[in-house]
Image (spheres, rainbow, N blue to C red):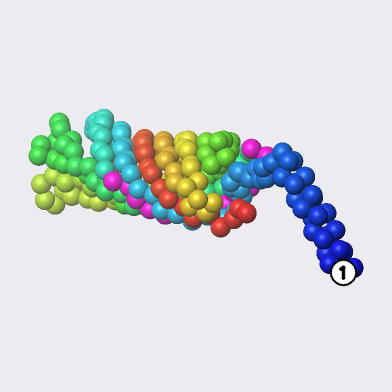
Amino acid sequence: MKLFAAFTVVSLLCAGAVAQAADLPSRSIVKPAVATAGINWSGFYVGAHAGWTGVNDRQRLYSPTFALGISNSDSGFLGGLHAGYNFQSGKMVYGVEADVSTTTLNKRFGIGAPFVATTGTIKLDFEGSIRGRLGYAMFDRGLLYGTAGVAIGHFKNSYRSAAPFAESVTSTRVGLTVGAGFEYAVTRNLIARTEYRYTDWLPHTNNLNVWLAPPGRSRSHTGQHQVTVGLSYLFGGP
């Protein structure tokens, strides 16, 4: 009987506790907000790019007997690889980048008087640059940046009249390049980009000992525009 009485008292107490708990207002469990972290742009990256490029070439032909000015333009495809390293301090991102590209620029043009049935060509086989970059991280995943540096390009100039007056000269030329672009982090490591650059290939002189008789020379000054899109892999970031 005592055991039954004790069991009855405990049962009544539990029932009362359950009833009180049922009368309490319900509480919803509040989950902590998950913070969305911005992309960390720091680290080494490599990638590929492709797009459009165009040049405007101005030449001056000299010989002991005359001087002649020529201007022509051409456009084509550009594609290549790039690699660089970023440092980040707050929203500011800075670093260095190098690239190498090949182009389809191969312009044939007429020269005109005093030459008859004479043509020339200018070809840009490949080019590269090394540049500094300075950018501002925005919208957590975006990077707006400017870039400037030194470019190196391999050019081939050809001139042809009636045989045997034909000549080709190759040269490695130096230029100054400047531009701007925007990058977007598709994931923490996969970065898409679009970029515009202008390169001023500094004036260069070629000696023409065969085509110009008596020997003369050409002095060329070339400007180049390029618009590219690309994809990079960033080895960094949390």
Name the residue: 36% across, 36% down: 225
Residue type at the position of mark 1: Met
Q: x and y percent of residue 26 in the render?
A: 69, 41
Q: x and y percent of residue 119 in the render?
A: 16, 41
Name the residue: 50% across, 46% down: 185
Task: Report the front residue among 221 and 24.
Answer: 24
Is residue 187 something one can see in this rendering? yes
Whether residue 180 appears in magenta in the rendering, the answer is no
Name the residue: 77% across, 45% down: 20
Compared across the picture, whether 13 is left or right of 167 comes to: right
Compared across the picture, whether 202 is left or right of 218 comes to: right
Instruction: Give the vertical position of 181 relative to 237 (above or below).
Output: above
* Element on which disc 1 rests: loop
Quadrant location of the N terminus in the rendered image: bottom right
Residue 11 quadrant? bottom right
Q: How many marks?
A: 1
Q: x and y percent of residue 215 in the render?
A: 26, 44
Q: Residue furthest right?
A: 2
Residue 59 quadrant? top left
Instruction: Give the vertical position of 78 relative to 178 (above or below).
Output: below
Q: x and y percent of residue 38 in the render?
A: 60, 43
Is residue 128 something one can see in this rendering? no
Q: Which residues are magenta?
A: 77-91
Name the residue: 44% across, 43% down: 193
Task: Report the front residue among 77 and 123.
Answer: 77
- Give the main secondary structure of the magenta stretch: strand
- Judge the density around disc 1: few (<14), some (14-19), many (≥20) Cα neighbours within 10 Å: few
Residue corresponding to mark 1: 1
Instruction: Give the vertical position of 238 relative to 220 (above or below).
Output: below
Whether residue 90 appears in magenta in the rendering, the answer is yes
